[in-house]
Amino acid sequence: MIKTPSDGLSASKLITVSAMSPERTESQPGNQPVGQRGQARLRVAVIDRDPGFMQVLSNRLGTLGCEHRALSSPVNVETLVAMRLNALVLDLAVIGPEGWEYLERVCGRLPGLAVIVCTGPSSVAQRVRGLRLGADAWMTKPCHPEELICVIEAAVRRHRRQELPQIDMAASIGEITIRPDLYQAYVGEQSLELTAREFEILQLLSQSDRVLRREEIYERVWGYAMAHGDRSVDVFVRKLRQKLRASSPSWSYIHTHFGVGYRFAPEPELSEAEQIGSDPQSAPELPAALTR
Amino acid sequence: MIKTPSDGLSASKLITVSAMSPERTESQPGNQPVGQRGQARLRVAVIDRDPGFMQVLSNRLGTLGCEHRALSSPVNVETLVAMRLNALVLDLAVIGPEGWEYLERVCGRLPGLAVIVCTGPSSVAQRVRGLRLGADAWMTKPCHPEELICVIEAAVRRHRRQELPQIDMAASIGEITIRPDLYQAYVGEQSLELTAREFEILQLLSQSDRVLRREEIYERVWGYAMAHGDRSVDVFVRKLRQKLRASSPSWSYIHTHFGVGYRFAPEPELSEAEQIGSDPQSAPELPAALTR
DNA sequence: GCGTCTTGATCACAGGATGTTTACACGCAA
DNA sequence: TTGCGTGTAAACATCCTGTGATCAAGACGC
């Protein structure tokens, strides 16, 4: 996939220093399980070349129950995307002259990734630059591994807040019922037959009572930044509407806000017949009036 | 180890801090168009006692368009809540022995608040403790103000998204209600049916208590400088007035300042009948008198 | 291994909504 | 009064979205 030969940064160069994952948790009380909150375990990658440092760090990360990966050279950004990381620790010195550009690309492509630059002595201007490019924190080596871990945790803590609180409870909205446990939505007993991605988008929309911009939807569902001009979200919204209409014809759920994005709100659809017969409360209940 | 950062970090590539500053306020990528994306101005509080430091920091924050507040002693946590802050910079030394407890209370009560501890020399254990208690970053004084600013920005950058409800609060002004979450304004429950751009302009105007020059409006909404002679702002103001008048006829909201720009201020409109019947104090409301 | 089916990504097109530009009328200040 | 800045309206250009179709990649059963 995706690897650009020109980079010379193929995945085959990845070196897994330690894969001591399964141990994890429940050792000492002082050990705060990082990947708690029922979330999946933290996935951390470290790009560095200092063997001693890596060793210590790996041990600590392993103890904390993080899945971690040590890389001795920068990897293709798309490879990073595929790794589905939560955090990245980066020594700019390893990357060389393109370090800044690399940092910018990574942060731009993965806005949800916690990026910690951990590098040797630097100037204020350098640190400022790194942070402006999107890094979440800057640690100066040599540093205590424990402190670095805490910085990682703090950065991830921030990022995680914006993730959806994983609610496994079924929710009924309008005529449909969303079943996160089954990754499916229903109207009564009838399944909407949503694909995985369709369901994720529906779930995201249904949990937000505001307009979501396409970029926001894309980023939260796909996990990385939306390319300019990408129409995927539109296409999925169309499919969703199609299936929703098929199963629940008298309701409309996903509303377009021109120039902004989409908003989820179940509203009874007024067919012509109903309109004629219905009460004259034609400036209806709040949510409907908010459609625009 | 700790190898000197290679060429990637060479001084030639660095943007000097001082050179950065002026650009930031003028235009260019660093400048977030305020009206767009529902971003409101940053609200920052600083608890510290170093007058010089505070002075410099205040200047920078002001230049960046942050609302900021300097506090020389710790304030009640609930007071902090009421301040609706985005970020808090804290010198633990100011608080004294119960600094840790204070930090914990603040972070616990305001998980969406970016907390930066900026204090004198400390041990690893102290920094670890601070970060574990919920701080987002730890800066050691003395530090460069610009770096601190960047750290604040980095911390807020992430927190911000989910904290939208606080920042994007609906606001009622005159008869209209502005709903950033829906990208729309209402009179009662009736939508004004603003387009995205119209809404952004209205929002920008409504957030400013002063006269805004056309160039200013254009730059903050469109995100780049206005071409000489461009009438777009005028046209949009007209459309806004039209829609405002249609939904809220007895108020006037957007006032022209000849030769300057526009100012937003809801004022009850005097119909002819009222004018005739009213007392001759016909240059009544102060704000109207300020029109020029 | 092979073909088939499902899923998701991408494209092109059309229609409509929106934003920009232009022209002219009006009003304010010198 | 003149000159310039502003209000108004409409024509025009552009962008945005809905839609259907196509294509590539993987899953699955044989």
Image (cartoon, coloured by chain):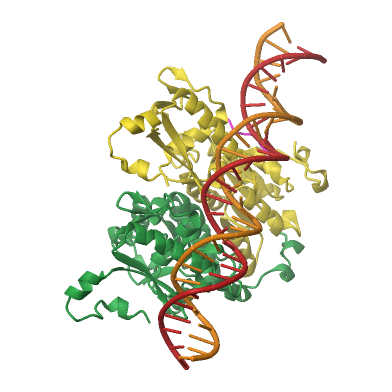
Chain colours: A yellow, B green, C red, D orange
Q: Position of residue B160 (x, y in %)?
A: 46, 54
Q: Quadrant of residue A137?
A: bottom right
Quadrant (top left/top right/bottom left/bottom right) for the N terminus of chain B: bottom right
Q: Position of residue A60 (x, y in %)?
A: 57, 42
Q: Is any atom of residue A93 visible in this view? A: yes
Q: With respect to residue A170, does A3 lie above or below? A: below
Stretch in magenta:
A17-22
Q: Position of residue B222 (x, y in %)?
A: 55, 63
* Residue at (31, 80) in percent of width and height: B289
Q: Is any atom of residue B50 visible in this view? A: no
Q: With respect to residue B15, does A147 lie above or below? A: above
* Residue at (53, 22) in percent of width and height: A193
**Taking B245 as reference, is B223 left or right?**
right
Main secondary structure along the magenta-highlighted residues: loop
Q: Position of residue B131 (x, y in %)?
A: 46, 53
* Residue at (43, 41) in percent of width and height: A208
**Taking B9 as reference, is B29 left or right?**
left
